[in-house]
Amino acid sequence: MSGHLTLDGVAYPFQSGQTVLEVARENGIKIPALCYHRKTGPAGRCRVCIVEVEGQAGLPTSCNLEAKDGMVVYTNTEAVLEVRRSVVNLLLANGEHNCLSCEQNGRCELQDAAYDLGIEIPAFTIIGPEVEIDDSSEMIVNDRRKCIQCGICVAACNNVVVNEVLGMGQRGFDSRIVCDLDVPMAESTCVQCGECVQLCPVGAFIEKKAIGQGRSWELETVDTTCPYCGVGCQLTLHVDTNANRIVRVTGREVVPNDGMLCVKGRFGYEFPSSPNRLTQPLIRKNGELEPVSWEEALDFTAERIKKIVEEHGPDVFSAFGSGRTTNESNYAISKFTRAVIKTNNVDHCART
Amino acid sequence: MKPDVRAQILDLAATYPTPQAALLSALQMVQEAEGGRLTTEDLSDVARLLDVPLGTVYATVSYYTMLNLEPVGKYHLQLDTNISAKLVGALDLLAHIEQALGISAGETTPDGLFTLSTVEDLGACGTCPVLQVNDRYYEKMTAERFDELLTSLKQGVMPDWKTEGNWGTECNILLARRGKPDSTALAGYVADGGYQALEKALTLSPAEIVQMVKDSGLRGRGGAGFPAGVKWSFLPKGSTKPVYLVCNADEGEPGTFKDRQIMEFDPHLLLEGMAVSGYAVGAKQGYIYIRGEFAWIADILERAVAEAREAGKLGNNILGRGVEFDVRVVRGAGAYVCGEETALIESLEGKRGNPRLRPPYPAASGVFGCPTIVNNVETLACVPYIVLEGAEAFSQIGTPNNTGPKLFGVSGHVNKPGVYEFPLGVPLAKILEAAGGVVGNLKAVIVGGLSTQILTADECRDLTMDYDTCAEYGTGLGSGGIIVMNDTVEIPEIALRTIEFYAHESCGQCTPCRQGSTTIKQMLKRVVDGKGSSEDLENVLQLCKTIMGNTLCPMGDAFSMPIEAMLLKYRAEFDSLLPDGSLVR
Ligand SMILES: Cc1cc2nc3c(=O)[nH]c(=O)nc-3n(C[C@H](O)[C@H](O)[C@H](O)COP(=O)(O)O)c2cc1C
Ligand code: SF4
Ligand code: SF4
Ligand code: SF4
Ligand code: FES
């Protein structure tokens, strides 16, 4: 059933099957929603996305509230704000929510919610046992002190990327994220894909190498294609322009990867600024590699190929395309090999 | 893993649509075979066998209190310290046991013989203090009896002590066969006219039975009082998926110990109720989800199921009439929330007992995503009477809109704690009289299990016990678990013990319950310890207000309503605990 619903006095159209939260987001109306992500679906856990609906008792959660024609919804009534404030205060009551030093500062959904609700100092304090940080793995730090138990990482690891590592261990106030049978992440079956990092709404899963390398507003974002393989995952580079250095990589939620990346695409981003990187052509002269101009390098290569093929025939030549170059380059390699050199010895790293 | 256990697990897994559904049972089987504890290797084995991710296995095993990741002694002594037990001296008994064993709760004796734990409600409120030793209950425990028990255990013998609880019935429907010798056997049940309702039911159409149950006015006995026949009619019409009937036998609400009376002493009454109901709703498979602590009752049920199947009362050709309905007994593993119907369904599917987000409701999508009806034991046990005697006869018992017999479990400060069957609408005073009268001066009563609002002695003087009247009095009939408190009781302590229970049992999914219960617990602890402030009390009230109605499952209401009531009605007692001068009102 499509139709129109009213959000804070303004009517908006919706498509059949949409939730109130989706309609609100689509139209730029902010409802905090800490446990919802499109990829993991409504979970109903955080309880901050509540709204008031005319003619309906209580305060339903908008993340799983199906939009209905003629529905009249208020997202910010005093009743809503009172409960929402209480819930966010409860989330802040324990753990280590210190935005001063947090990597998520500026892009944290809990921080946003607290800010929007005007919470300066948490209203309650829960004294709990010290919770450990798991920084055993190479790329990812799991700071459980910041975890708000939204369950998104567990759902993502198991149902989105299907790496099936994470679980929510124990229960109640003692609940905590575990890897496999509660082993450190480094000893677990985690493949460091970083989906949990990308989807965690707070700073409980963060990129290890990015720690202290710049806050979100200090970094410039550049959308690009992952250079590693032929899938062509879309990603965003977060760049410290002063240092001309990539600080972190996030996946873009578009075709073909919908935000997911592999360990290389997400964490193998140092090579552009590596001092070992080739920046100009080299030719070995008298046993030493010497920088030369592109012209010289190309002439030299063409001459050698020509000579070898002339002397030994085309079948001594073979070419390997690479997944790290574009489709067009790979096409050119194939065409060059078959039409110019006249051999079928052409292959590609992504063929296996 | 032992090969026979492995084979058993695989056999079980094969009966479910997904192997994961066998996870919880598999963990229980392995634990039992491996001496009461699950090692990392056991968990990996089970994970591989059932093709369940390791993280999910850990999440499941660490959720349930009866699954042990740490070694326990040869005898695991578990003392119920919930409110009903506390009222009759469980904490003194605990001190005695600790002294006798030379360890504190949570510890194991150096010889590895005994582990002592304090646990939440064991569903034995009328016979407490109760001590569970491995899978056996020792009820009406005293210091002397404990010493005797200990001597026996030290000699390697778990004595076979039977405890007879008090009971009485005015209706002779649910407890009709309670006093009979060997009341669990099929022969006796049949001799007393059992399974005639099933005979009759099979001559009727399913729709006719649903109508009868609707007409009878039978309301669910699990707590919410929702009309059973109406619930049944919510099943989607024309669905091609199988329908499941689930009997909720989790009985974990403190103050409640009624369902076990039916299952332990008249299991065929429940099975007949299930067979008739299963036929009515079009289910071929029924499950009885029973709390894991009731191990011996689960055994009784399993024997009854086998007997009934043998006699053609269950199975794929019931009474030779081509009707198919069978029952499986599934044991929980220690989690109060698993009494909540969607958590129960998750647990039945072998997972953590996390309540599900609704909609969809179980009638549309329950066990394995199929239409499912969940009813309480007592609800289902009423069905044979309705079918046999007619809706009219049933609705004449009790009061309008509150029909039929009801089991009331009375615990705490009465002379004869026990279970009493009366028509709904019976005066509370009459129940208390049946329970031998109040010990000392009545101060307060919790009438419907711990999740309902406390009533002062004055408030409950004229109360009659049915759903509507209890609601009028600002409380609920709930499960009919009546906890009686005399004037030796201090309400702030009861409030603290209440919230300790709920904080312990919160599944942790949603913020208000997980964080709120623990916040309230710590604030009330401060108050009870004389270190609180009036701000703490105001905060508790504010939290109760904002938690109520705002949690994923009704558990948030289950603690915010009673805590708020205790605080509002007995504010002076709380205030008197505040340090001098801190009271600013
Ligand atoms: C936290 C919680 C615990 C519950 N525990 C039980 C229980 O132990 N037994 C039970 O029958 N119902 C229990 N219920 C109620 C069930 O969710 C469900 O309403 C009931 O089993 C339906 O059966 P009925 O309609 O026959 O009463 C519980 C509900 C909640 C919220
Ligand atoms: S990095 Fe990927 S595989 Fe590892 S825990 Fe996170 S989501 Fe799972
Ligand atoms: S680690 Fe992050 S994503 Fe995972 S439950 Fe905690 S807050 Fe949610
Ligand atoms: S209210 Fe929330 S946390 Fe509490 S038991 Fe229900 S789902 Fe779990
Ligand atoms: S986003 Fe709706 S409950 Fe968390």
Image (tube, rainbow, N blue to C red):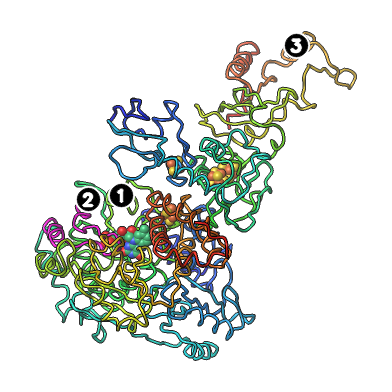
Residue B5 vertical placement versus A98 (above, below) = below
* Residue B15 visible in image: no
Question: Cβ–Cβ below 8 Å for labels 2 and 1?
Answer: yes
Instruction: Indicate whether B131 appears above or below A317.
Output: below
Disc 3: CA contacts within 10 A as few (<14), some (14-19) or many (>=20) = few
Furthest residue to the right? A286
Q: Residue A238, located in which quarter of the rendered image?
A: top right
Q: Which mark is residue B294?
A: none
Q: In the rendered structure, which segment of residues is drawn in magenta?
A: B207-235
Q: CA distance from mark 1 to mark 3?
A: 70 Å
Between the C-alphas of marks 3 and 2, the distance is: 77 Å
Can you give x and y, in whole percent of width and height, for residue B17 in the image?
36, 54
User: Which residue bears the numbered disc 3?
Assistant: A298
Residue linked to disc 1: B361
Residue B38 within the magenta-colored segment of the rendering: no
Point 19% across, 54% down: residue: B230
Question: Residue tagged by mark 2?
Answer: B234
Chain to which mark 1 belongs: B
Residue beneath the point at 31% across and 77% down: B264
- Left or right: residue A6 versus residue B110 is left
Instruction: Specify the subunit that label 2 lies on.
Output: B
Q: What amino acid is found at the position of numbered circle 3 in the picture?
A: Leu
* Residues indicated by labels 2 and 1 sit on the same polypeptide chain: yes
User: Residue at image x 32%, y 52%?
Assistant: B366
Q: Is mark 2 within 8 Å of ligand 1?
A: no
**Mark 1 surroundings within 10 Å by alpha-carbon count, few (fewer than 14), some (14 through 19), many (20 or more):** some
Q: Amino acid at mark 1?
A: Tyr
